[in-house]
Image (cartoon, grey):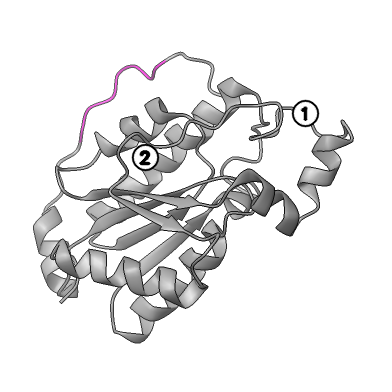
Amino acid sequence: MNSGEGATNVVWHAHQVARDERAEQKGQKPCVIWLTGLSGSGKSTVANALEGELFRAGYHSYLLDGDNVRFGLNKDLGFSDADRVENIRRIGEVAKLFADAGLIVITAFISPFRADRNMVRHLLPAGEFFEVHVHAPLDVCEGRDPKGLYKKARAGEIKHFTGIDSPYEAPDSADLTLNTGELSVQDAVNQLLAFLKARERLA
């Protein structure tokens, strides 16, 4: 985990190729689409489907998924509040770099704390971060329980599980809310595509 000690004797190195030039080369406008919601709400499923649509339409994108990132970059982090904060801080910095490279970045993380999501928003230029609340009621998420995590949490086998014994702070004013308790995956993706077109991120 991050020790809290910042690096010293470092100097920012300016790039010969500018951020706007990377985006122009790809013929698109970069952004970060941040999907947040409870486990089982459908974040990863919707994110995967969205990336597929973008790929087939010729856009350059990359999906950062919560579980996948914990196999590598964040494998040293657990699920305490402090580790969750550090998890999102690292992902925010990675998402910023990918957007700087001109990509459309999709993330699927529970990211339970508003302050952490707002921190990531402020890493990006104005208008490039979109907070998408993938919302399904707790009982719906628990009924799906695709990984069997709610069952383990209820049995006390998993501690600090969001929605059970660790809080989830829903967005106060998400840029878009997808009610996946009612929407099909395709309907959710269609809403996302329409939203991105309205925000002039897609042609």
Whole-percent x, y for residue 167 in the image: 59, 27
The residue labelled by disc 2 is 93
Kindly identify the amino acid type of the residue bearing the numbered disc 1: Lys
Q: Identify which residue is drawn at 34% across, 77% down.
A: 54
Crowding around mark 1 (Cα neighbors within 10 Å: few <14, some 14 to 19, many 20+) is: some
The total number of labels drawn is 2
Please name whichever residue, 10 or 146, is drawn nearer the observer in this view of the structure.
146
Mark 2 burial class by Cα count in 10 Å: few <14, some 14-19, many 20+: some
Mark 1: which secondary structure?
Answer: loop
Q: Position of residue 64 (x, y in %)?
A: 48, 56
* Left or right: 131, with 133 as reference point: left
* Nearer to the camera, 94 or 39: 39
- The stretch drawn in magenta includes residue 11: yes
Q: Amino acid at mark 2?
A: Glu
Q: Are marks 1 and 2 in contact (CB under 8 Å)?
A: no
Q: Is residue 38 magenta?
A: no
Give the residue at x 23% y 61%: 102
Quadrant of image for the C terminus: bottom left
Q: Nearer the viewer, mark 1 or mark 2?
A: 1
Q: Main secondary structure of the magenta part?
A: loop
Secondary element type, mark 2: helix
Quarter of the N terminus within the rendering: top right
Residue 17 in sight: no
Would residue 14 be visible to someone looking at this image? yes
Is residue 192 placed above or below 99 in the rendered structure?
A: below
- The magenta region covers 6-12
- Among the two numbered marks 1 and 2 on one chain, the one whose residue lies closer to the N terminus: 2
The one nearer the camera, 42 or 90, is: 42
- What residue is pinned by disc 1? 159
Q: Indicate the position of residue 79 as horizontal and vertical percent values.
A: 66, 30
| Viewer-side residue, 67 vs 76 | 67
